[in-house]
Image (cartoon, rainbow, N blue to C red):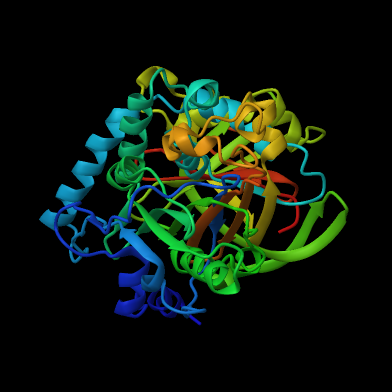
Amino acid sequence: MNGEDLYNGVTEIRDDQIAEAQNLAGQKTARKRTKLPRGRRWLAPVAAVLAVVMIAGSFLNLRNGSLNAYAVSTAEYPKQAKYSAINDTPVLEARQERYRFAEIYAGTMENFTSAVLPGLLSGAGTENRICSPVNVYMALSMLAELTEGESQGQLLTLLDCDTLETVRTRANALWNANYIDDGTVTSIPANSLWLSEDLEFVQKTLDTLSDTYYASSYQGKMGTKKFDGAMQSWIDQNTRGRLKKQSSRLEMDPETILALVSTLYYRAKWSHEFQKSKTSPEVFHAPDGDRTVDFMHEATDSTYYWGETFSAASKYLRNSGNMWFILPDEGVSVDQLLTDGTAADFLNAVTSSSADRNWENSKYLEIHLSLPKFDVSSDLDLTESLKALGVTDVFDPNTADFSPMLEESSLEKLPLPPYISYVKHAARVTIDEEGCEAASYVVLPAAGAGAPPDDEVDFILNRPFLFAVTGPNGALLFVGIVNQP
Protein backbone atom coordinates (compact mmCIF):
# COMPACT_ATOMS: atom_id res chain seq x y z
CA MET A 1 0.00 0.00 0.00
CA ASN A 2 1.49 3.37 -0.97
CA GLY A 3 1.24 6.71 0.78
CA GLU A 4 -1.80 7.88 -1.15
CA ASP A 5 -3.65 4.67 -0.33
CA LEU A 6 -2.97 5.21 3.36
CA TYR A 7 -3.99 8.86 3.12
CA ASN A 8 -7.22 8.03 1.32
CA GLY A 9 -7.98 5.33 3.86
CA VAL A 10 -8.04 8.02 6.51
CA THR A 11 -9.67 10.88 4.61
CA GLU A 12 -12.34 8.97 2.69
CA ILE A 13 -14.35 7.72 5.65
CA ARG A 14 -18.06 7.72 4.91
CA ASP A 15 -19.88 10.99 5.48
CA ASP A 16 -22.40 9.44 7.86
CA GLN A 17 -19.59 8.14 10.09
CA ILE A 18 -17.90 11.51 10.21
CA ALA A 19 -21.20 13.23 10.91
CA GLU A 20 -21.92 10.92 13.84
CA ALA A 21 -18.43 11.16 15.30
CA GLN A 22 -17.73 14.85 14.88
CA ASN A 23 -20.58 16.74 13.22
CA LEU A 24 -18.14 18.71 11.12
CA ALA A 25 -20.72 20.98 9.58
CA GLY A 26 -21.50 24.70 9.55
CA GLN A 27 -19.32 27.78 9.41
CA LYS A 28 -19.73 28.74 13.06
CA THR A 29 -18.95 26.97 16.32
CA ALA A 30 -22.55 26.77 17.43
CA ARG A 31 -23.64 23.75 19.48
CA LYS A 32 -26.77 21.68 19.10
CA ARG A 33 -28.30 20.66 22.43
CA THR A 34 -31.23 18.64 23.64
CA LYS A 35 -31.84 19.35 27.29
CA LEU A 36 -32.83 16.48 29.52
CA PRO A 37 -35.37 16.87 32.32
CA ARG A 38 -34.00 18.34 35.51
CA GLY A 39 -34.40 16.94 38.97
CA ARG A 40 -32.90 13.44 38.74
CA ARG A 41 -29.91 12.66 40.90
CA TRP A 42 -26.42 11.18 40.63
CA LEU A 43 -26.22 7.95 42.62
CA ALA A 44 -22.68 6.61 42.32
CA PRO A 45 -18.97 7.39 41.80
CA VAL A 46 -17.88 9.56 38.88
CA ALA A 47 -16.16 7.99 35.87
CA ALA A 48 -13.98 9.61 33.21
CA VAL A 49 -11.85 8.56 30.21
CA LEU A 50 -8.80 9.95 28.33
CA ALA A 51 -6.25 8.34 25.92
CA VAL A 52 -3.49 9.04 23.36
CA VAL A 53 -2.37 7.27 20.13
CA MET A 54 -0.08 7.92 17.12
CA ILE A 55 -0.78 5.71 14.15
CA ALA A 56 -1.04 4.96 10.42
CA GLY A 57 -4.44 5.14 8.70
CA SER A 58 -7.19 2.55 8.83
CA PHE A 59 -10.84 2.24 7.85
CA LEU A 60 -13.33 1.60 10.63
CA ASN A 61 -16.93 0.60 11.04
CA LEU A 62 -19.41 1.74 13.66
CA ARG A 63 -20.22 -1.14 15.99
CA ASN A 64 -22.97 -1.84 18.50
CA GLY A 65 -25.48 0.56 17.02
CA SER A 66 -25.65 4.24 16.23
CA LEU A 67 -24.26 6.90 18.56
CA ASN A 68 -27.27 9.05 17.73
CA ALA A 69 -29.47 6.80 19.85
CA TYR A 70 -27.64 8.01 22.96
CA ALA A 71 -26.89 11.62 21.98
CA VAL A 72 -27.92 14.33 24.44
CA SER A 73 -25.89 17.12 22.86
CA THR A 74 -23.46 16.99 19.94
CA ALA A 75 -20.57 19.40 19.55
CA GLU A 76 -20.29 20.98 16.12
CA TYR A 77 -16.73 21.65 15.03
CA PRO A 78 -15.65 24.65 12.96
CA LYS A 79 -15.66 23.89 9.25
CA GLN A 80 -12.27 24.29 7.61
CA ALA A 81 -11.34 25.06 4.03
CA LYS A 82 -9.52 22.26 2.24
CA TYR A 83 -6.01 22.86 1.00
CA SER A 84 -5.77 23.21 -2.79
CA ALA A 85 -2.78 25.47 -3.49
CA ILE A 86 0.21 27.02 -1.77
CA ASN A 87 -1.40 30.47 -1.74
CA ASP A 88 -4.87 29.20 -0.87
CA THR A 89 -6.33 32.24 0.95
CA PRO A 90 -8.96 30.45 3.11
CA VAL A 91 -6.36 27.93 4.31
CA LEU A 92 -3.84 30.68 5.06
CA GLU A 93 -6.50 32.61 6.97
CA ALA A 94 -7.28 29.49 9.03
CA ARG A 95 -3.60 29.13 9.87
CA GLN A 96 -3.39 32.75 10.97
CA GLU A 97 -6.42 32.18 13.20
CA ARG A 98 -4.68 29.21 14.81
CA TYR A 99 -1.61 31.36 15.43
CA ARG A 100 -3.79 33.90 17.23
CA PHE A 101 -5.20 31.15 19.45
CA ALA A 102 -1.68 29.84 20.12
CA GLU A 103 -0.61 33.27 21.37
CA ILE A 104 -3.19 32.98 24.16
CA TYR A 105 -1.48 30.01 25.79
CA ALA A 106 2.09 30.68 24.56
CA GLY A 107 4.56 29.91 27.33
CA THR A 108 1.86 28.85 29.80
CA MET A 109 2.20 25.05 29.47
CA GLU A 110 5.90 24.82 30.24
CA ASN A 111 5.44 24.26 33.98
CA PHE A 112 2.79 21.63 33.26
CA THR A 113 5.10 19.84 30.83
CA SER A 114 8.01 19.90 33.28
CA ALA A 115 5.78 18.47 36.00
CA VAL A 116 4.04 15.67 34.13
CA LEU A 117 6.67 14.22 31.78
CA PRO A 118 8.81 12.52 34.47
CA GLY A 119 5.75 11.14 36.25
CA LEU A 120 4.01 9.85 33.12
CA LEU A 121 7.00 8.47 31.19
CA SER A 122 9.78 7.42 33.57
CA GLY A 123 10.10 3.88 34.84
CA ALA A 124 9.32 2.26 31.49
CA GLY A 125 11.99 -0.40 31.97
CA THR A 126 12.22 -2.38 28.73
CA GLU A 127 8.81 -1.26 27.44
CA ASN A 128 7.72 1.60 25.19
CA ARG A 129 5.80 4.42 26.80
CA ILE A 130 3.85 7.33 25.27
CA CYS A 131 1.77 10.23 26.54
CA SER A 132 0.08 13.28 25.06
CA PRO A 133 0.63 16.43 27.15
CA VAL A 134 -2.06 18.27 25.15
CA ASN A 135 -4.60 15.48 25.64
CA VAL A 136 -3.86 15.11 29.36
CA TYR A 137 -4.12 18.88 29.83
CA MET A 138 -7.50 18.94 28.07
CA ALA A 139 -8.91 16.04 30.11
CA LEU A 140 -7.75 17.49 33.44
CA SER A 141 -9.17 20.88 32.46
CA MET A 142 -12.60 19.32 31.91
CA LEU A 143 -12.28 17.43 35.18
CA ALA A 144 -11.68 20.77 36.91
CA GLU A 145 -15.07 21.94 35.57
CA LEU A 146 -16.75 19.09 37.47
CA THR A 147 -15.13 19.90 40.83
CA GLU A 148 -15.02 22.55 43.51
CA GLY A 149 -13.01 23.37 46.62
CA GLU A 150 -9.66 21.66 47.21
CA SER A 151 -10.46 19.05 44.56
CA GLN A 152 -10.52 21.80 41.97
CA GLY A 153 -7.64 23.68 43.62
CA GLN A 154 -5.26 20.73 43.23
CA LEU A 155 -6.13 20.45 39.55
CA LEU A 156 -5.64 24.19 38.99
CA THR A 157 -2.19 23.98 40.61
CA LEU A 158 -1.11 21.16 38.30
CA LEU A 159 -2.57 23.03 35.30
CA ASP A 160 -0.63 26.13 36.45
CA CYS A 161 -3.77 28.28 36.50
CA ASP A 162 -5.01 30.68 39.17
CA THR A 163 -8.69 30.49 38.28
CA LEU A 164 -11.13 28.23 36.46
CA GLU A 165 -11.71 31.03 33.96
CA THR A 166 -8.01 30.89 33.07
CA VAL A 167 -8.32 27.15 32.53
CA ARG A 168 -11.25 27.72 30.18
CA THR A 169 -9.42 30.38 28.18
CA ARG A 170 -6.27 28.29 27.75
CA ALA A 171 -8.04 24.99 27.06
CA ASN A 172 -10.30 26.56 24.44
CA ALA A 173 -7.32 28.23 22.76
CA LEU A 174 -5.36 24.97 22.91
CA TRP A 175 -8.23 23.12 21.22
CA ASN A 176 -8.68 25.68 18.45
CA ALA A 177 -4.96 26.11 17.79
CA ASN A 178 -4.53 22.37 17.29
CA TYR A 179 -7.73 21.57 15.40
CA ILE A 180 -6.71 21.08 11.75
CA ASP A 181 -8.62 19.26 9.02
CA ASP A 182 -7.53 20.93 5.78
CA GLY A 183 -6.70 17.87 3.68
CA THR A 184 -2.95 17.97 4.28
CA VAL A 185 -2.82 17.68 8.08
CA THR A 186 -5.31 15.99 10.37
CA SER A 187 -5.19 17.04 14.02
CA ILE A 188 -8.51 16.52 15.77
CA PRO A 189 -9.09 16.78 19.52
CA ALA A 190 -12.46 15.39 20.63
CA ASN A 191 -14.24 15.34 24.00
CA SER A 192 -17.35 13.64 25.33
CA LEU A 193 -19.31 12.77 28.48
CA TRP A 194 -21.11 9.48 29.02
CA LEU A 195 -23.99 9.72 31.49
CA SER A 196 -26.11 7.20 33.35
CA GLU A 197 -29.69 7.21 32.07
CA ASP A 198 -30.98 6.83 35.63
CA LEU A 199 -29.48 10.13 36.77
CA GLU A 200 -29.79 13.88 36.27
CA PHE A 201 -27.03 16.40 35.82
CA VAL A 202 -26.47 20.13 36.04
CA GLN A 203 -27.27 21.47 32.59
CA LYS A 204 -25.15 24.58 33.10
CA THR A 205 -22.05 22.43 33.56
CA LEU A 206 -22.75 20.43 30.41
CA ASP A 207 -23.33 23.68 28.50
CA THR A 208 -19.93 24.98 29.63
CA LEU A 209 -18.23 21.76 28.55
CA SER A 210 -19.95 21.98 25.17
CA ASP A 211 -19.24 25.68 24.61
CA THR A 212 -15.63 25.70 25.84
CA TYR A 213 -14.32 22.19 25.17
CA TYR A 214 -16.50 21.08 22.22
CA ALA A 215 -17.70 18.16 24.35
CA SER A 216 -20.63 16.01 23.21
CA SER A 217 -22.85 14.21 25.75
CA TYR A 218 -24.40 10.74 25.53
CA GLN A 219 -26.77 9.05 27.97
CA GLY A 220 -27.57 5.37 28.41
CA LYS A 221 -27.57 2.43 30.78
CA MET A 222 -24.17 2.09 32.41
CA GLY A 223 -22.60 -1.35 32.53
CA THR A 224 -24.40 -2.68 29.43
CA LYS A 225 -22.66 -4.02 26.35
CA LYS A 226 -24.58 -1.63 24.09
CA PHE A 227 -23.63 1.53 25.97
CA ASP A 228 -20.04 0.38 26.47
CA GLY A 229 -19.97 -0.47 22.77
CA ALA A 230 -21.22 2.99 21.82
CA MET A 231 -18.45 4.60 23.88
CA GLN A 232 -15.85 2.26 22.37
CA SER A 233 -17.14 3.14 18.89
CA TRP A 234 -16.87 6.86 19.63
CA ILE A 235 -13.25 6.37 20.72
CA ASP A 236 -12.48 4.23 17.66
CA GLN A 237 -13.97 6.81 15.31
CA ASN A 238 -12.07 9.68 16.87
CA THR A 239 -8.77 7.76 16.93
CA ARG A 240 -9.34 6.26 13.45
CA GLY A 241 -9.54 2.74 14.87
CA ARG A 242 -5.92 2.63 16.02
CA LEU A 243 -6.68 1.88 19.68
CA LYS A 244 -9.29 -0.82 19.21
CA LYS A 245 -7.35 -3.30 21.31
CA GLN A 246 -7.28 -0.87 24.23
CA SER A 247 -10.79 0.54 23.79
CA SER A 248 -12.34 -2.94 23.62
CA ARG A 249 -11.29 -3.45 27.24
CA LEU A 250 -13.06 -0.31 28.48
CA GLU A 251 -16.15 -1.34 30.41
CA MET A 252 -18.11 0.82 32.85
CA ASP A 253 -19.51 -0.66 36.07
CA PRO A 254 -23.30 -0.32 36.53
CA GLU A 255 -22.55 2.01 39.48
CA THR A 256 -20.63 4.46 37.30
CA ILE A 257 -22.45 7.77 36.98
CA LEU A 258 -20.31 9.54 34.39
CA ALA A 259 -17.37 8.87 32.06
CA LEU A 260 -15.28 11.76 30.75
CA VAL A 261 -13.59 10.87 27.45
CA SER A 262 -10.98 12.94 25.63
CA THR A 263 -9.15 11.89 22.46
CA LEU A 264 -6.56 13.32 20.10
CA TYR A 265 -5.87 12.13 16.56
CA TYR A 266 -2.98 13.39 14.43
CA ARG A 267 -1.64 12.58 10.98
CA ALA A 268 0.92 14.37 8.80
CA LYS A 269 3.50 13.54 6.15
CA TRP A 270 7.17 14.41 6.31
CA SER A 271 8.05 17.55 4.39
CA HIS A 272 10.68 15.39 2.66
CA GLU A 273 9.85 11.70 2.70
CA PHE A 274 12.49 9.03 3.23
CA GLN A 275 13.49 7.08 0.14
CA LYS A 276 12.25 3.53 0.56
CA SER A 277 15.20 2.26 -1.47
CA LYS A 278 17.50 3.42 1.33
CA THR A 279 15.62 1.55 4.07
CA SER A 280 17.64 -1.41 5.30
CA PRO A 281 17.70 -3.87 8.25
CA GLU A 282 20.10 -2.91 11.01
CA VAL A 283 20.68 -3.65 14.69
CA PHE A 284 18.83 -1.77 17.44
CA HIS A 285 20.32 -2.18 20.92
CA ALA A 286 17.15 -2.70 23.00
CA PRO A 287 17.33 -2.93 26.82
CA ASP A 288 16.62 -6.67 26.70
CA GLY A 289 18.95 -7.49 23.83
CA ASP A 290 19.82 -6.61 20.25
CA ARG A 291 17.24 -6.95 17.50
CA THR A 292 17.23 -6.32 13.78
CA VAL A 293 14.72 -3.74 12.51
CA ASP A 294 14.28 -1.59 9.40
CA PHE A 295 16.15 1.74 9.52
CA MET A 296 15.34 4.74 7.32
CA HIS A 297 18.19 6.96 6.16
CA GLU A 298 18.69 10.45 4.83
CA ALA A 299 21.31 13.18 4.70
CA THR A 300 19.97 16.69 5.13
CA ASP A 301 21.09 20.15 6.18
CA SER A 302 19.44 20.90 9.51
CA THR A 303 20.08 22.05 13.07
CA TYR A 304 21.85 19.66 15.42
CA TYR A 305 21.44 20.16 19.19
CA TRP A 306 23.41 18.85 22.15
CA GLY A 307 23.64 19.06 25.91
CA GLU A 308 25.78 17.55 28.64
CA THR A 309 24.07 14.15 28.38
CA PHE A 310 22.26 14.02 25.02
CA SER A 311 22.10 14.99 21.36
CA ALA A 312 18.98 15.86 19.36
CA ALA A 313 17.60 16.65 15.92
CA SER A 314 14.21 17.14 14.33
CA LYS A 315 12.40 16.40 11.09
CA TYR A 316 9.71 18.67 9.64
CA LEU A 317 6.14 17.52 9.09
CA ARG A 318 4.48 19.07 6.03
CA ASN A 319 2.29 22.10 6.87
CA SER A 320 2.56 21.17 10.54
CA GLY A 321 5.23 21.03 13.24
CA ASN A 322 8.21 18.79 13.89
CA MET A 323 9.10 15.36 15.15
CA TRP A 324 11.96 15.61 17.62
CA PHE A 325 14.44 12.85 18.43
CA ILE A 326 16.48 12.97 21.65
CA LEU A 327 19.30 10.43 22.03
CA PRO A 328 20.93 9.98 25.46
CA ASP A 329 24.70 9.69 25.46
CA GLU A 330 26.26 6.26 25.89
CA GLY A 331 25.88 5.23 29.52
CA VAL A 332 22.98 7.67 30.10
CA SER A 333 19.42 6.32 30.37
CA VAL A 334 16.23 7.84 29.01
CA ASP A 335 14.92 7.87 32.59
CA GLN A 336 17.80 10.10 33.64
CA LEU A 337 16.88 12.70 31.00
CA LEU A 338 13.31 12.64 32.30
CA THR A 339 13.89 12.69 36.05
CA ASP A 340 16.61 15.36 36.08
CA GLY A 341 14.46 17.67 33.92
CA THR A 342 16.80 17.69 30.92
CA ALA A 343 14.22 16.41 28.46
CA ALA A 344 11.50 18.85 29.55
CA ASP A 345 13.91 21.79 29.60
CA PHE A 346 15.08 21.03 26.07
CA LEU A 347 11.58 20.52 24.65
CA ASN A 348 10.27 23.66 26.34
CA ALA A 349 13.18 25.64 24.89
CA VAL A 350 12.95 24.46 21.29
CA THR A 351 9.15 24.66 21.13
CA SER A 352 8.83 28.04 22.83
CA SER A 353 7.97 31.15 20.83
CA SER A 354 10.12 33.28 23.15
CA ALA A 355 13.40 34.35 21.61
CA ASP A 356 15.23 33.93 24.93
CA ARG A 357 14.25 30.27 25.15
CA ASN A 358 16.38 29.09 22.20
CA TRP A 359 18.72 26.21 23.04
CA GLU A 360 22.26 27.52 23.39
CA ASN A 361 24.12 24.48 22.03
CA SER A 362 23.03 24.13 18.41
CA LYS A 363 24.68 24.13 15.02
CA TYR A 364 23.43 24.06 11.43
CA LEU A 365 25.19 21.33 9.47
CA GLU A 366 24.67 18.18 7.40
CA ILE A 367 23.03 15.45 9.48
CA HIS A 368 23.20 11.82 8.43
CA LEU A 369 20.04 10.50 10.09
CA SER A 370 19.44 6.79 10.72
CA LEU A 371 15.97 6.29 12.20
CA PRO A 372 14.19 2.98 12.91
CA LYS A 373 10.65 2.55 11.62
CA PHE A 374 8.41 1.89 14.59
CA ASP A 375 4.90 1.12 15.71
CA VAL A 376 4.89 1.58 19.48
CA SER A 377 2.04 1.69 21.97
CA SER A 378 1.38 1.78 25.71
CA ASP A 379 -1.60 1.43 28.02
CA LEU A 380 -1.00 3.19 31.34
CA ASP A 381 -2.78 3.73 34.64
CA LEU A 382 -2.01 7.33 35.60
CA THR A 383 -3.71 7.25 39.01
CA GLU A 384 -0.56 7.04 41.14
CA SER A 385 1.32 9.48 38.90
CA LEU A 386 -1.41 12.11 39.34
CA LYS A 387 -1.48 11.54 43.09
CA ALA A 388 2.29 12.06 43.20
CA LEU A 389 1.74 15.33 41.32
CA GLY A 390 -0.62 16.56 44.06
CA VAL A 391 -4.02 15.57 42.60
CA THR A 392 -5.31 13.42 45.47
CA ASP A 393 -8.74 14.61 46.63
CA VAL A 394 -10.69 13.50 43.55
CA PHE A 395 -9.64 9.89 44.20
CA ASP A 396 -10.93 9.84 47.78
CA PRO A 397 -14.70 9.64 48.50
CA ASN A 398 -14.07 11.42 51.80
CA THR A 399 -12.56 14.49 50.13
CA ALA A 400 -13.75 14.55 46.49
CA ASP A 401 -16.04 17.47 45.68
CA PHE A 402 -18.11 17.10 42.51
CA SER A 403 -20.70 19.70 43.45
CA PRO A 404 -20.91 21.29 39.97
CA MET A 405 -22.36 18.03 38.66
CA LEU A 406 -24.60 17.32 41.67
CA GLU A 407 -27.43 19.16 43.36
CA GLU A 408 -26.92 19.53 47.10
CA SER A 409 -30.18 17.76 47.89
CA SER A 410 -28.98 14.64 46.09
CA LEU A 411 -25.69 14.28 47.96
CA GLU A 412 -27.50 13.10 51.11
CA LYS A 413 -29.11 10.27 49.15
CA LEU A 414 -25.85 8.84 47.80
CA PRO A 415 -24.63 5.56 49.34
CA LEU A 416 -21.08 6.73 48.59
CA PRO A 417 -19.81 10.20 47.62
CA PRO A 418 -18.66 10.40 43.99
CA TYR A 419 -14.92 10.04 43.33
CA ILE A 420 -12.51 8.99 40.57
CA SER A 421 -11.48 5.35 40.86
CA TYR A 422 -8.69 5.29 38.25
CA VAL A 423 -7.24 7.10 35.23
CA LYS A 424 -6.32 5.17 32.06
CA HIS A 425 -4.16 6.54 29.27
CA ALA A 426 -3.55 4.56 26.06
CA ALA A 427 -1.30 5.62 23.19
CA ARG A 428 0.11 4.39 19.92
CA VAL A 429 2.61 5.95 17.49
CA THR A 430 3.65 4.76 14.06
CA ILE A 431 6.18 6.29 11.68
CA ASP A 432 7.37 5.13 8.28
CA GLU A 433 8.98 6.60 5.17
CA GLU A 434 5.92 8.78 4.46
CA GLY A 435 5.06 10.30 7.83
CA CYS A 436 3.35 9.72 11.15
CA GLU A 437 -0.16 9.48 12.61
CA ALA A 438 -1.52 9.83 16.14
CA ALA A 439 -4.55 9.51 18.42
CA SER A 440 -5.26 9.35 22.17
CA TYR A 441 -7.68 8.72 25.08
CA VAL A 442 -7.64 8.83 28.93
CA VAL A 443 -9.98 7.02 31.35
CA LEU A 444 -10.96 8.21 34.83
CA PRO A 445 -13.86 6.07 36.12
CA ALA A 446 -15.37 6.44 39.59
CA ALA A 447 -16.77 3.83 41.67
CA GLY A 448 25.31 15.39 26.09
CA ALA A 449 27.22 14.93 23.53
CA GLY A 450 30.15 17.29 22.84
CA ALA A 451 30.10 19.88 20.09
CA PRO A 452 29.74 18.28 16.65
CA PRO A 453 32.30 18.46 13.82
CA ASP A 454 32.35 21.52 11.59
CA ASP A 455 30.53 20.17 8.55
CA GLU A 456 28.51 17.00 9.24
CA VAL A 457 27.46 14.54 11.93
CA ASP A 458 26.03 11.03 12.11
CA PHE A 459 22.83 10.85 14.19
CA ILE A 460 22.10 7.15 14.62
CA LEU A 461 19.08 6.23 16.77
CA ASN A 462 20.09 2.62 17.38
CA ARG A 463 19.44 2.52 21.13
CA PRO A 464 16.57 3.71 23.40
CA PHE A 465 15.58 7.31 22.66
CA LEU A 466 12.88 9.92 23.28
CA PHE A 467 10.65 11.41 20.61
CA ALA A 468 8.18 14.30 20.57
CA VAL A 469 5.65 15.47 17.99
CA THR A 470 4.69 19.14 17.97
CA GLY A 471 1.79 20.89 16.30
CA PRO A 472 2.28 23.85 13.93
CA ASN A 473 2.48 26.25 16.87
CA GLY A 474 4.82 24.17 19.03
CA ALA A 475 2.30 22.39 21.29
CA LEU A 476 3.59 19.02 22.52
CA LEU A 477 1.04 16.64 21.03
CA PHE A 478 2.90 13.40 21.81
CA VAL A 479 6.02 12.48 23.75
CA GLY A 480 7.33 8.94 24.06
CA ILE A 481 10.11 6.48 24.75
CA VAL A 482 11.17 3.93 22.13
CA ASN A 483 12.77 0.93 23.82
CA GLN A 484 11.45 -1.67 21.35
CA PRO A 485 10.93 -0.37 17.77
Q: Residue at x 26, y 61 (%)?
A: 182
Q: Position of residue 217 (x, y in %)?
A: 39, 56
* Nearer to the camera, 423 or 431: 423
Residue 376 coordinates in the image, percent (x, y): 66, 59
Residue 146 % position (x, y): 45, 37
Could you tell whether 411 is left or right of 382 in the image? left
Number of numbered discs overlaid on the protein picture:
0
Q: Residue furthest right?
A: 289
Q: Which of 423 and 254 lies nearest the eye of the viewer?
A: 254
User: Which of the two residues, 444 or 252, is positioned nearer the viewer here?
Assistant: 252
| Side (left or right) of 74 relative to 296 | left
**The C terminus lies in which quarter of the figure?**
bottom right
Quadrant in the rendering for residue 420: top right
Residue at the location (34% across, 25% down)? 166
Residue 460: percent from the left, percent from the top? 67, 48
Residue 87 appears in the figure: no
Say left or right for 320 vs 140: left
Above or below: residue 357 compared with residue 190 = above
Q: Is residue 382 above or below residue 428?
A: above
440, above or below 404, in the image = below
Residue 240 appearing in the image:
yes
Residue drawn at 51 percent across, 79 percent down: 63
